[in-house]
Amino acid sequence: MNYNLISDQWITVKDFNSNIQKIKPEQVVDPQWDTLDTPRADLKGALFQFMIGLLQTAFAPGDQEQWEKYWETPPSEEVLGKSFARFQHAFYLNNDESKPAFMQDFDLSDGEQKPVVSLLLEAPGEKTLKDNQDHFIKRGMIQKMSAYWAALSLFTLQINAPAGGAGHRVGIRGGGPMTTLLIPPENLNADSLWHRLWLNVLTLEEMEHTSGNLKLSEDKNIFPWLTETRTSESKGMEVLPEHAHPLQMYWAMPRRIRLQWDMNQKEQCDISGEPVETMVTHYNTKNYGANYEGYWRHPLSAYDVPPDKVPNSVKAQTGGLSYRHWMGLVIEDPKKHRQPALIVRSYKEWRCNSIGGLDEAQLWSFGYDMDNMKARCWYEASMPVFSLSEQLQLELDYQVPKIIEAANDSLKTLKKALKMAWFKRPKDAKGDISFIDHSFWEQTESAFYNYLRLLINQLDNEQAIKKVLNKWRQSLQSEAIKIFDNYVLSSLNEDGDMKRIIKARKYLEKWLNVSKPMKVLKVA
């Protein structure tokens, strides 16, 4: 049996009553579907990117007018199905070794054999298993996957590929990129799965300004598994934007992998628990696959774009996602030369007006925090995206850095004060105290967005702006002192020296009043 991701019913969706069903890709236009559903958070993020990439490849609107047409009235299943069928040949999963197969090396006939669990980014590596350090992700838990979950796991690996040892290449956005997708405003009555996907599809006019070579329009330049792999054993063999069509950004394939199939095995998939007849238990892999280099900028990721340097996609980092990342993912951060994803900029330029999105949309941000090959954590969060005039957006861009800088300074001071309270020699203190960061960002997040909304509603009133900034200052002071008091007598305290604690608290109170970032917020 040949499995195909275009013609088969394999995508799991959930309706608005939380009922689950399997559909073909073309059926996403049915308004009864609420969202995509998967057993794992990383697979859900990948499945959304798969469907967005498929729509971008097979059904991209020519211009703004056509985009608006399909926002208002989605295409029929028949129309969408015909567009998808054009690319069906590129989405077979288990073709024999002489034929192309989805996200798999065109002609890989040998290589190292690995268990299928190694497709999952958090799976323990060989050294971890050898050293018996698989304490959290145990060996043997996932030994077999169904055809479709194996394909989606493979796709997840290819688009997020971290450093994997000598010659095992990272994804086109680097290892462990942050992905940012838009979710429509709630007030629009446009919260179906179709609208969630379509809001993240660019027009052909917009795609003309992305990375890649539009002249390379053959399918093999979009789907790299349709032709011989551009390997990278030596310099000069990199895949630069001039070597591939822009759509390859959605289908980039840095790893050389070929799945191995066990047919007619009536067992359960270890990912989903579903009974299936065709299993994947192992795959072959080889290093020196496609090495993506140069000025690539994926439309669904924010980038740091320093002058005269190659853009670097924003990655997830230890400590999670919070409002401190709002500047950079939603609005530009000039200090870091950080620019939001193209899809976010496009939304603020015209899409918000096209859909009547006067209320805030949401930005769904997610990604793995990678330490080379090691996945430390999966993070995801939602952040508001506001629809503002150009003049008000400029004013907001001026005010927000003050707010976030004051928060960063407050956290830095809080950590220093706690070390002063806990240890006789704070500078020599060792150990991970990132839990303080997490606590601070979590406890101040609600206030940040509340004051941000107040600020946005009064951006044309200078006196009102000053009052909001001052209230934010007071909120930071209050929360920092509250966190200090909660933690100061914890087990980290060496000896409970109250004089040292009182001195540290006075230092904290003073600095929260006199530091430059806090003074900027204070009403004169």
Image: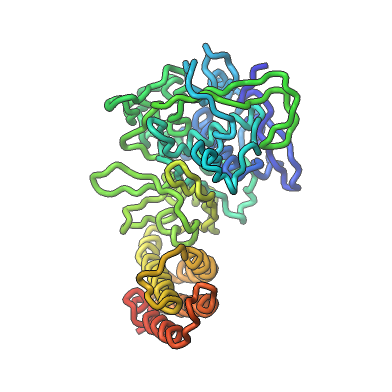
- In x, y percent, where is residue 59? 53, 30
Is residue 66 visible in this depiction of the protein? no
Tell me, what colour scheme is on the image?
Answer: rainbow
Residue most extreme to the left: 308
Is residue 392 visible in this depiction of the protein? yes
The residue at 49%/60% (across/down) is: 322
Residue placed most toward the observer, 388 or 200: 200
Residue most extreme to the front: 131
- In x, y percent, where is residue 254? 43, 30
The residue at 61%/56% (across/down) is: 187
- In x, y percent, where is residue 441? 49, 66
Q: Quadrant of the C terminus?
A: bottom left
In the image, residue 256 sits, relative to residue 128, either above or below, namely: above
Q: Quadrant of residue 216?
A: top left
Q: Quadrant of residue 116?
A: top right
Q: Relative to 456, is 232 on the left or the right?
A: left
**Count of labels in the image:** 0
- In x, y percent, where is residue 62? 46, 33
In the image, residue 92 sits, relative to residue 120, either above or below, namely: above
Residue placed most toward the observer, 132 or 55: 132
In the image, residue 279 sits, relative to residue 355, either above or below, namely: above
Q: Quadrant of the N terminus?
A: top right
The residue at 59%/26% (across/down) is: 282
